[in-house]
Amino acid sequence: MDTNDNAPVFSQSLYKAQVSENAPFQTSILTVTATDLDEGINGEIVYSFIERGNFNPEALFSINPDTGEICVRGKVNYEENIAYDIRVQARDKGTPSRSVHGKVLVEVTDVNDNLPKIIISSLMSPVRENVEVGTVVALVTVTDKDGGKNGLTSANIVGLVPFKLKLNYKNYYSLTVDGPLDRESVSQYNVTITAADEGTPPLSSTTVIPVHISDVNDNSPFFSEPVINVHVNENSPAGATIVTITAVDPDTGENAKVTYSLLDGISKMIPLTTVINVNSETGDIISLQSFNHEELKTFQFKVQATDSGVPPLSSNVTVNVLVLDENDNSPTILAPYSEHGSVNSESIPYSAEAGYFVAKIRAVDADSGYNALLSYHLSEPKGNNLFRIGTSTGEIRTKRRMSDNDLKAHPLVVMVSDNGEPSLSATVSIDVVVVESTADIQTQFRHVPIKEDSFSDLNLYLLIGIVSVSVIFLLSLISLIAVKCHRTDGSFSRYSAPMITTHPDGSWSYSKSTQQYDVCFSSDTLKSDVVVFPPQFPPVDGELISINGGDTYGRTQTLPNTEKVY
């Protein structure tokens, strides 16, 4: 009978096998085989693992006790162990049993199952906006636990940012500045770095590095417009805020803190500090006095805005202040009717026709615009139907001829009003005396000293002398022109198309067909509608004449009590 006198024997002294990393459960690795020369139960073999040290093969692998097949039981990780040294025991079932130990080496093949890892160190944040190109912002390290090509990596920056990765050694990089930085445009950059391996398929990972940009005082305060126009009401109270000046500095912190100050303005004769002041923090322009439009209509000054950076930066703005007029001045009657203590008197003949010129009231208003637009009215006597006054001219004229029922003296009160709100006015009194003939007319009667009357008589004599000389000169000139025309043409012809032409030197030309007569007037004469024609060719009343070369037309009319004036 057989006795158990033979131990099992493995077919190989060393078994080698490979298993893929992360192989599924129950994946067969290999089968170990042992033989026993004994028979029966003495030759039946049971296979098992032998635990060695801290490693228990049964945690990752299983072995069929009858067949010796070794399978995957747990998760095989290449990154933890690239190979496993397993001891296997083959034992027979005899009594006493005999056994033998075998060696199995299981190699783990790598699978690209690990993402590259990005490690950031030495991050410099914030970064000053004026740093030079090439400044190192951070150190970047990329690692991959896989082996072979699965562990080879590369890193890149995603997007357009003023930074770049510079390879130092193997998987070590430097993140550097690659362009100008401007905090006012971008105050923070999120730099995205992507690392990828060379496995199949490749795996990649991404990380974002926030890079803050710190401010540098590289921007001056600026105003929305270089010139500011301000309108201020006349007589506004002192201490009122005229305007608020605001400057914006795109920097931040102390670099953006703006203070305001006044520069030159108004004139060298008027110190600016006596007229206005500026709040250095708010930019409020405050008036130090009440403005008078009649004294100061407009003035100009400059305001400087300065930030608190190092070094400080500044900019200027020009402020134009226009003082708006208010109706605070009454009209003023001009001489001769404004003389203090005088009695204003005018005389008109009893034979005066309608429209006879009596007097002209002149007045001025120190205000401007509509506040200085004056109108003239007769306020007394009420219901007067003998005199009228031009609303805009101030000329007092008769409305009709005198009648026997009219008074010999007419006290008139003229009121001059401006167009302001509320309207202001001034009045002047004139006594109009009706005399029998023009010889009794005196232009003005005033209770003034004798010395002044003598002076007025002298002026009257001078005026009469000047008028006499002018008339003589005018008649001589007309005669000379008539003689020259007679010599040129030999005869005088009359046509039905007379023409009066105005010359730039202040002369008038009267022509009928080929005949032309020049009449010269002074600048005052040109303001009237009186034209003198040569006595040889008096125009017919109602005859159509052209003035200024045909641009204006009119008809002749003989003036009363005259022979040659039309």
Image (tube, rainbow, N blue to C red):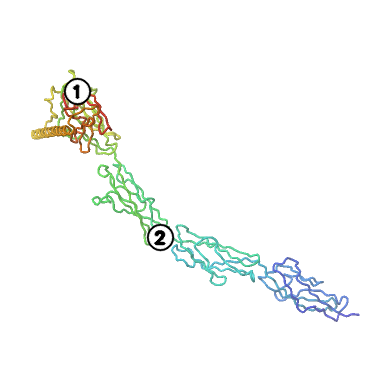
Say which residue label 1 marks.
353
Q: Nearer the viewer, residue 413 or 99?
A: 413
**x, y percentage for residue 314?**
36, 57
**Residue 218 image label:** 2
Residue found at the far bottom of this picture: 5
Specify whether residue 388 is in view. Answer: yes
Q: Residue at x 13, y 25 (%)?
A: 438
Residue found at the far right of this picture: 1
- The residues bearing labels 1 and 2 have C-alpha atoms spaced at a distance of 85 Å
| Mark in front: 1 vs 2 | 1
Q: Is residue 325 left or right of residue 451?
A: right
Q: Amino acid at mark 2?
A: Asp
Few, some or many residues within 10 Å of mark 2 (<14, 14–19, 20+):
some
Q: Are marks 1 and 2 in contact (CB under 8 Å)?
A: no
Q: Amino acid at mark 1?
A: Glu
**Residue 563 image label:** none
Q: Circle 2 sits in a helix, a strand or a loop, which is it?
A: loop
Residue 469 lies in quadrant: top left
Residue 235 lies in quadrant: top left
**x, y percentage for residue 153?**
60, 68
Identify whether 111 is placed above or below 4: above
